């Protein structure tokens, strides 16, 4: 069976290596995103990315998505009728590749009139510094997939996001009744306890994904903004 890997684009523009490539096996073509030489995600196993969007419910409204990835969370939210999606992406190159339509899903997301792509650090924005020009909250929902989770960090400066204080700051960017969903590479008991101390109705959903000879147990955490949580939004 014919097997081939094609690098569609590669960049080190933002201080780290990111590559978009296609893996072709027989008649099957899979898009892959590689960060610093390590596999990040692909277009074949998108269950957890879709679950992140599902966590906001069937009327997502106006949404902030932290981390573009290959676009599957955004695509799901658009299909569910999201009225507007602001995407914050750390990689300027990935935004350019989406606008150039290098994959069908990135092309769909980048050219939907309801989507605005912003280059910036979602973690810093949600912590209150600095603001990103043209980006204004509050939002009805927030989806965060900007790191591997509280116990599997790629970027250490994201650690603050997974603290009780960090989550409280994020909730300040939501409208009353708003909801935030957070993707994690695996479950975290400590993080779960922090979430339930803020909102006892927080949820943890495990998503099982088979990757070759191993099974990955991803986690999607969901938390609602408390009715008395009234932090100033961006």
Image (cartoon, rainbow, N blue to C red):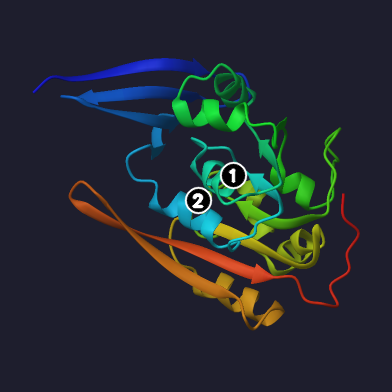
Side (left or right) of 8 relative to 95: left
Which of discs 1 and 2 lies nearer the camera? The answer is 1
Q: Residue at the location (52% across, 37% down)?
A: 71
Residue 163's label in the rendered image is none
Give the x, y percent position of residue 35. Answer: 47, 32
Across the whole image, how many numbered discs are drawn on residues? 2
Give the x, y percent position of residue 17. Answer: 51, 24
Q: Do the residues labelled 1 and 2 touch (CB within 8 Å)?
A: no
Residue 224 seen anywhere in this rendered image of the structure: yes
- In the displayed structure, 215 sits above or below 1; it is below
Residue 184 seen anywhere in this rendered image of the structure: no
Residue tagged 2: 148
**First reached walking from the N terminus: tag 1 or tag 2:** 1
Query: Label 2 crowding class (10 Å Cα cut-off): few <14, some 14-19, many 20+?
Result: some
Where, by quadrant of the figure, is residue 138 drawn?
A: bottom right
- Seen from the viewer's position, the closer of residues 104 and 20 is 104
Give the x, y percent position of residue 195. Answer: 64, 74
Side (left or right) of 180 relative to 28: right
Q: Residue at the location (88% across, 64% down)?
A: 231
Side (left or right) of 137 relative to 209: right
Residue tagged 1: 78
- Seen from the viewer's position, the closer of residues 148 and 99 is 99
Q: Residue at the location (15% across, 24% down)?
A: 26
Q: Quadrant of the N terminus?
A: top left
- Seen from the viewer's position, the closer of residues 206 and 127 is 206
Give the x, y percent position of residue 140. Answer: 74, 58
């Amino acid at each position: 069976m014919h097997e081939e890997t094609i690098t569609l684009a590669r960049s080190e523009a933002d201080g780290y290596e990111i590559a978009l490539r296609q893996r072709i096996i027989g008649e099957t073509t899979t898009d892959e995103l590689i960060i610093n030489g390590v596999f990040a995600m692909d277009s074949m196993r998108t269950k957890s990315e879709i679950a992140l969007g599902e966590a906001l419910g069937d009327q997502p409204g106006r949404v902030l998505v932290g981390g573009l990835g290959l676009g599957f969370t955004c695509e799901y939210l658009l299909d569910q009728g999201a009225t507007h999606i602001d995407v914050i992406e750390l990689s300027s190159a990935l935004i350019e590749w989406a606008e150039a339509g290098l994959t069908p899903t990135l092309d769909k997301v980048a050219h939907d009139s309801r989507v605005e792509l912003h280059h910036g650090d979602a973690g810093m924005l949600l912590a209150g510094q600095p603001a990103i020009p043209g980006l204004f909250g509050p939002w009805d929902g927030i989806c965060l997939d900007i790191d591997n989770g509280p116990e599997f960090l790629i970027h250490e400066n994201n650690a603050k996001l997974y603290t009780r204080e960090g989550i409280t700051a994020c909730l300040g960017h939501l409208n009353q009744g708003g909801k935030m969903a957070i993707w994690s590479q695996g479950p975290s008991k400590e993080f779960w306890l922090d979430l339930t101390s803020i909102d006892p109705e927080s949820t943890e959903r495990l998503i099982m994904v088979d990757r070759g000879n191993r099974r990955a147990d991803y986690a999607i955490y969901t938390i609602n903004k408390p009715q008395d949580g009234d932090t100033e939004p961006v």
